[in-house]
Image (cartoon, rainbow, N blue to C red):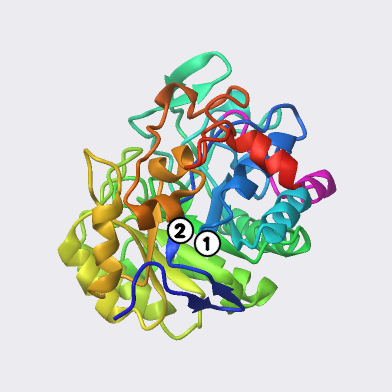
């Protein structure tokens, strides 16, 4: 019987344990260059005891941005800045994947290059708000993507994946969850298309499949993961199909491609079990535990075979040495929600390790 503290082979790398740092946006890439700041190196290096780190969402182009101060992977300066991060994680013995994310209709013109507007499968505004430099505003009606524009976005993802490997990342994860662009194509209320990218189940999964194919062609299937959130209504997504049919078709279409892993942000345990049975490779789960955060009691999901890898969000944000704390049963720092997005090092690199020493000073001393 495997435990969360056992190693696991994942594509080209060997993970020291099965505890994953989930992707979490922190909105600290200030300025027009959209580069991760020096503190980002500290932040991820502190958490290198994770079996796998998955970064915050990184936009493949400026037009993919959905929130202020999110980082990119589309310029040489960004590649160099991320190389500082990956080098630090690797020196600390960690493994790190870059999550590639296009926000689609969840965005605002004020966040995009001059003259650009958010895009989506169809001209349907999300009944949601988005944060901008002027505060929260309603999402605008997106420009519906043409097939040529879809092809260009697929190419953008492939280029960002190549940049990720040049920046030293061990792999990339496609963000296909939480109401962003890939999820919008899967959705019934955001995707009203009558062409080959909509209508049927096969049409709605096509965009995701084309991006995955482009990523695997660019960097190899064993460097590519995919995150899904079946049934998650976040950002005004509605999925009216039988979820087992929609996501079963997507998983079946990907099953033979040799991907590094499939990651599921859980909606219902029964659907998790269904997808787990259909997926032949490494399976990662961010279990549904709300209103509490995922905690030590959920490690049993690895032991009982529900998943191969288990990802932690807020608890990893607040506990840089989370695997050790899980092994010892705590205690756990409590996350400060007021510092989740934006700001400086407070609530970012200053959470203490179990021995009580400030995390940032520990890392600086070891660097």
What secondary structure is found at the residue carrying circle 1? Answer: strand
What secondary structure is found at the residue carrying circle 2? Answer: strand
Which label number is shown at residue 20?
2
Q: In this view, does 315 lie to the left or right of 148?
A: left
Contact (CB < 8 A) between labels 1 and 2?
yes
Q: Residue at x 36, y 72 (%)?
A: 308
Q: In which quarter of the image is residue 39?
A: top right
Q: Which residue is drawn at 72% across and 59% down?
A: 91
262 above or below 108?
below
126 above or below 297?
above
Residue assigned mark 1: 52
x and y percentages locating residue 301 in the rendered image: 25, 66
Q: In this view, does 50 lie to the left or right of 36?
A: left
The extreme front residue here reads 355
x and y percentages locating residue 90 in the rendered image: 69, 61
x and y percentages locating residue 347 in the rendered image: 52, 28
104 above or below 90?
above
x and y percentages locating residue 322 in the rendered image: 44, 50
Give, as a single range, the part of the protein colored magenta.
68-81
Judging depth in this view, the residue of 209 and 307 nearest the camera is 307
Decide: few, some or many residues near mark 2? Use Cα within 10 Å; few <14, some 14-19, many ≥20: many
Q: In which quarter of the image is residue 360?
A: top right
Q: Which residue is drawn at 63% across and 59% down?
A: 157
Residue 204 visible in rendering: yes
The extreme bottom residue here reads 256
Q: Is residue 79 magenta?
A: yes
Q: In which quarter of the image is the N terminus?
A: bottom left
Q: Which residue is drawn at 72% across and 64% down?
A: 165
Q: How far apart are marks 1 and 2 (CA)?
A: 5 Å
Residue 101 visible in rendering: no
């Amino acid at each position: 019987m495997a435990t969360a503290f056992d190693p696991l082979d994942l594509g080209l790398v060997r993970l020291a344990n099965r505890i994953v740092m989930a992707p979490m946006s922190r909105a600290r890439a200030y300025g027009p260059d959209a580069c991760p700041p020096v503190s980002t190196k500290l932040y991820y290096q502190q958490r290198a005891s994770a079996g796998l780190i998955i970064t915050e969402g990184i936009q493949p182009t400026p037009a993919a941005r959905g929130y202020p101060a999110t980082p990119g992977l589309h310029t040489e300066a960004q590649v160099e800045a991320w190389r500082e991060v990956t080098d630090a994680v690797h020196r600390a013995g960690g493994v790190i994947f870059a999550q590639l994310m296009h926000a689609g209709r969840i965005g605002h013109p004020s966040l995009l290059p001059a003259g650009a507007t958010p895009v989506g499968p169809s001209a349907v505004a999300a009944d949601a708000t988005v944060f901008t430099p002027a505060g929260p505003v309603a999402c605008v009606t997106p420009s519906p993507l043409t097939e040529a524009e879809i092809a260009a976005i697929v190419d953008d993802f492939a280029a960002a994946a190549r940049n990720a490997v040049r920046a030293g990342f061990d792999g990339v994860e496609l963000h296909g969850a939480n109401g962003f662009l890939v999820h919008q194509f899967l959705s019934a209320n955001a995707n009203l298309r009558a062409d080959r990218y909509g209508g049927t189940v096969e049409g709605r999964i096509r965009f995701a499949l084309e991006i995955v194919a482009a990523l695997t062609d660019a960097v190899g299937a064993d460097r590519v993961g995919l995150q899904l959130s079946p049934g998650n209504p976040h950002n005004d997504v509605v999925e009216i199909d039988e979820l087992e049919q929609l996501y079963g078709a997507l998983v079946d279409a990907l099953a033979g491609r040799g991907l590094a892993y499939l990651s599921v942000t859980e909606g219902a345990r029964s659907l998790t079990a269904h997808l787990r049975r259909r997926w032949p490779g490494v399976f990662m789960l961010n279990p549904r535990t709300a209103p509490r955060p995922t905690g030590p009691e959920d490690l049993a999901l690895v032991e009982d075979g529900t998943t191969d890898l288990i990802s932690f969000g807020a608890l990893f944000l607040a506990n840089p040495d989370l695997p050790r704390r899980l092994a010892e049963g705590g205690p756990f720092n409590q996350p400060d929600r007021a510092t989740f997005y934006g700001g400086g090092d407070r609530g970012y690199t200053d959470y203490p390790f179990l021995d009580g020493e400030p995390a940032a000073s520990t890392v600086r001393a070891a660097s």
